[in-house]
Image (cartoon, rainbow, N blue to C red):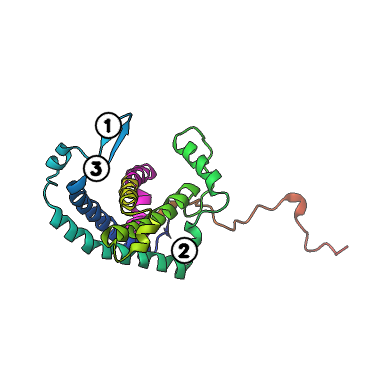
Amino acid sequence: MKVIKEKHAFAMRLTHWVNFPVLAIMIWSGLLIYWASGVYTISIFGYTLIKFFPPKFYEFFNLRRRLAEGMAFHFLFMWFFAVNGFLYILYTIISGAWRELVPKKSSFKEAWLVVLHDLHIRKTTPPQNKYNAAQRIAYTSIIIMGFGSLFTGLAIYKPAQFYWITWLCGGYHFARILHFALTMGYLLFFVVHVVQVILAGWNNFRSVIAGFEVLEVSAVPEFQQLPEEPHLKVDPNEPEK
C-alpha cells in the first residue's frame, strides 16, 4: 500500500529553486568580472599546475571583454541572493526547521558512516530522520558559505566604504581569494548534490518539487485481532473462582 507523506514545506522549496538560477547568474557574471584580472594559479616551485582559467575557456563560453555587463548583473542579482537567503533563514527560525538542519554532536561521526554507506563499503543504513548527518553538515555549511560570499563581496565591492569588512577579510586581495574559493565551493557542492539526488531516485526529487513523497507501507492493519488460544478460552457458564 502506498501513502503520501509531506516532506518539504512550500517556503523551503521556493527559496531552494529561486536560489538555483540566482546563484547560476552570480557565478556566470562573476566569471565575466574575473576575466578582467584572472591572476590566480596553483603553482609549485614556479611551475604553474592550474590556471583559473585558460583563455580558451573564456572563448568557448563567450566570456571575454564583457566586464561592464558582468558587474551590472553581479551587483543586481546579489540583492536577490541576499534577500532569498534571508527569507530562507527567517523561515527556518520561525518554523523551527533549523532543528532538522543544524548538525548535532554525533553528526560528524555519523557523516562518516553515510559516506561509507554511499560508497557501498558499509551495508547498514546510517541513522536518518528528515536529513542524515552528512546532509545536516552540508546544508549548514552552504548557509555559512552564503554569509561568507556576501561578506567578502562587500569587501571587494566597496573597499573604501566598508574598510572594516575588508580589514576583517585580511585585505582586498585576500578577500578576493576567499570570494573565489567560495565560488569553487558552490560548484563542488552542486556536483555532489546532483549526484546524490540522482542516487536517491525520483521519489526524493519529486519531494523537492511537489513537497511530498510516496512511501510503501505494510498492508497489515495497525490493530489486528489475534486468534484465541485454546487454553485462554473462558466458559461463560463456569462460575468465577
Q: Which residue is mark 3?
A: 39
Q: Amino acid at mark 2?
A: Ala
Label 2 and label 1: CA atoms lie apart by 46 Å
Q: Residue 153 or 226: which is nearer the viewer?
A: 153
> Does the magenta segment cover residue 200?
yes
Q: Main secondary structure of the magenta part?
A: helix
Closer mark to the observer between disc 2 and disc 3: 3
Residue 18 visible in image = yes
Q: Is residue 3 left or right of residue 80?
A: right
Q: Is residue 185 left or right of residue 101?
A: left
**Residue drawn at x 47%, y 57% as measured from the top left:** 101
**Residue drawn at x 48%, y 49% as measured from the top left:** 132
Work out whether mark 1 precedes mark 3 in sequence or the reverse, and give the earlier one.
3
Q: Secondary structure at mark 1?
A: strand
On screen, residue 59 above or below 140 = above
On screen, residue 151 above or below 179 = below
* Residue stretch in magenta: 188-211
Instruction: Find residue 56 and report its image quarter.
Output: top left
Closer mark to the observer between disc 2 and disc 1: 1
Instruction: Find residue 192 and report its image quarter.
Output: top left
Q: Which residue is mark 1?
A: 48
Q: Secondary structure at mark 2?
A: loop
Work out whether mark 2 precedes mark 3 in sequence or the reverse, and give the earlier one.
3
Q: Residues within 10 Å of mark 1 (few under 14, many from 20)?
A: few
Q: Amino acid at mark 1?
A: Thr
Q: Which residue is mark 2?
A: 97
